[in-house]
Image (tube, grey):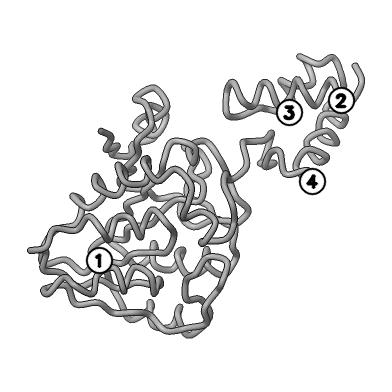
Amino acid sequence: MLAPSRHDAILGALAERGTVMTAELADRLGVSVDTVRRDLLELETAGQLRRVHGGAVRPAPGKRRFVERAREDTGGKAVVGALGARAVQSGQVVAIGGGTTALELAHWFAPELSATVVTTSPDVAIALRDLPDVDVIVLGGRLDRTSQTLVGAETVAQIQTLRPDVLVVGACSIHPEFGLTMREREEAQVMRVLAERSRTVVVLATAEKLGTAAPYVVSARIDMLVSDASAAALAPYEQAGIEVVRP
């Protein structure tokens, strides 16, 4: 089988199952494991998958820049944002990351909510300005224009002084085996420290984010997953011990 045909077969299996294993592909395609590894490398270089130990998963979907992602799947983000807002209770200290789904979450908070919100996102902070009983703290740092969040050593140092009740983070990618991952290295570093410091980690993820992986690990611990995906798509996350909230 020629390389283009193998690539098509690999991508077809990936679209069907969400994950492919190197050894299984070698048996299925009738080639060596080394050949499959080269195929996976070529497909990863082309941006069509993300290699992981023993195989590959679908890559992080969507555009990288915040301003471009803001126009994508607004209906799904609204559903997830509304559901996620219910996970935040009055009296809590709530950390919120950046991203368009996190911004949608901020628009769904009840007017009577009384809480302290700590965020790395200037957009989230502005969205909360009209809630009279929400104390908004914006973590300082350097603005990463791609993620539109504040990042860097100064941001991490401030997080080390916090112990949030809950972290709510919009997923770039989430996988039942590999956890929450992101495309931007510095944003992932900040979110990783917030996840370590928070008592509960809540992930917001529209359906296309499930079963995907990005280069930088944020957290293997996910306490709650809020998604608009089907029950079947969310079953592997429930089996991993994650509380799942869906419409």
Decide: few, some or many residues near mark 1? Use Cα within 10 Å; few <14, some 14-19, many ≥20: many
In this rendered view, identify the residue nearer to me: 62 or 10. Answer: 62
In this rendered view, identify the residue nearer to me: 221 or 181. Answer: 181
Question: What kind of residue is marked 4?
Answer: Thr
Question: What kind of residue is marked 3?
Answer: Thr
Residue 22: assigned label: 3
Point out residue 1 in the picture as x, y percentages from the top left corner: 90, 16
Left or right of residue 125, residue 25 in this image? right
- Residue under the image location 83 percent in, 40 percent down: 42
Decide: few, some or many residues near mark 4? Use Cα within 10 Å; few <14, some 14-19, many ≥20: few
Q: Are marks 1 and 3 in contact (CB under 8 Å)?
A: no
| Label 1 residue SS | strand
Left or right of residue 85, residue 102 in this image? right
Point out residue 40 in the picture as x, y percentages from the top left corner: 78, 36
Q: Are marks 3 and 4 in contact (CB under 8 Å)?
A: no
In this rendered view, identify the residue nearer to me: 240 or 114. Answer: 114
Query: Does residue 34 sit above or below 171 in this rendering?
Result: above
Residue 45: assigned label: 4
Decide: few, some or many residues near mark 2? Use Cα within 10 Å; few <14, some 14-19, many ≥20: few
Residue bearing the label numbered 1: 94
Sequence order check, earlier mark of 1 and 3: 3
Sequence order check, earlier mark of 2 and 4: 2
Sequence order check, earlier mark of 4 and 1: 4
